[in-house]
Image: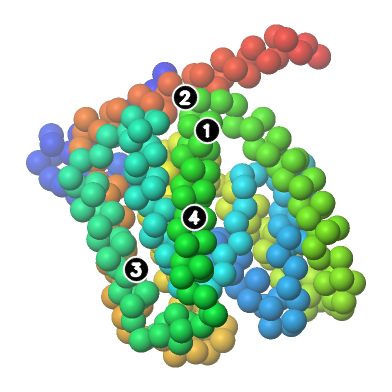
Amino acid sequence: MAPPLLPAAEEDGGCVARWMRRDVLLGLALGQFVSLLITSTGFSSSELARRGINAPTSQSLLNYILLSLIYGVVKSYQYTSLTSVMLLDCWSIPCVIILTWIFLKTKYGLRKFIGVGVCVAGLILVVFSDVHASDRAKGPNPLKGDLLVIFGSMLYACSNVTEEYLVKKSNRIELMAMLGLFGAIISGIQISILERKELHSIKWNAGAVLPFLGFALAMFLFYSTVPTVLKICGATMLNLSLLTSDMWAVLIRIFAYHEKVDWIYFVAFAGTAAGLLIYSYKSSKEAEETAQVAGASDEQGKAGDEEDGMQNPA
């Protein structure tokens, strides 16, 4: 059975109630939670880099092991410069919209596109601000870097959309457990090939171990929460929510590194937040359709679990 809906906003004659629906508030909250987790992984990686430790695959290995032991993980990604991360976030959004429209038959109205536009516009303010002028100037081959970012964003979009489909149609626990298991195996192989010397050179004290553990925990919680966000809101909303991770990073720069940031960051954050609210706004009809889809996927998941139990009796 689909979960009961909150009273329709039209009956009260107000618009605020449409944003106060349980699924909308939960989706927004979880979206910002995973955004903060992504920021935490960046902070952990930054701390490791400051200590001269550069072992990204090793960082991911513990995350994969945790996820495979408990219930799994989705594919992880390593980002480069802040500008590249922003471009990756921006370009993945239209890719996700196109893929979900083609393969998942997701419907997008004018209001959704306005919300997406406002979110992306907020981030563009940061990308083209003077704060990142030096960051953009770095790199011996900017064209090659841009092409790699665009290609990476397409893969990221494919990963999100595929996971959204599997989360809504398949057994999520089994899916994540298998991905986590094989992710750990692949990461172990990569470490043995690419990072053996780096691991031998690391002085394993508290300053090195704690950022590793912090990164793994943040990624574990991130990938544990992503399926719920995908089920409630979809891949597009997930990617829009992750745009704010660059804004949350400002707080780390201010309080952890005592750096000065440009005021345009805060304008961009406000714009992105406004875009998220516009995108998440749902009419009563849209809310009912969302509840029906969620209810149907829950029923399908329970049926799959019961079938597995019958085939594998204790």
Q: Which residue is mark 4?
A: 151
Q: Closer to the camera: disc 4 or disc 3? A: 4
Q: CA distance from mark 3 to mark 2?
A: 34 Å
Q: Position of residue 179 (x, y in %)?
A: 68, 39
Q: Tell me which numbered mark, 4 or 1, is placed earlier along the sequence.
A: 4
Q: Is residue 7 above or below residue 52?
A: above
The amino acid type, in three-letter code, at marker 4 is Phe
Q: Is residue 220 left or right of residue 143?
A: right
Q: Residues within 10 Å of mark 2 (few under 14, many from 20)?
A: some
Q: Which residue is mark 1?
A: 167
Give the position of the C terminus as an image quadrant. Answer: top right
Secondary structure state at the residue bearing disc 3: helix
Q: Which residue is mark 3?
A: 123
Q: Residues within 10 Å of mark 4 (few under 14, many from 20)?
A: some
Q: Tell me which numbered mark, 4 or 2, is placed earlier along the sequence.
A: 4
Q: Closer to the camera: disc 4 or disc 1? A: 4
Secondary structure state at the residue bearing disc 1: helix
Is mark 2 in CB contact (under 8 Å) with mark 1? yes
Q: Tell me which numbered mark, 3 or 2, is placed earlier along the sequence.
A: 3
Q: CA distance from mark 2 to mark 1?
A: 9 Å
Q: Closer to the camera: disc 2 or disc 1? A: 1
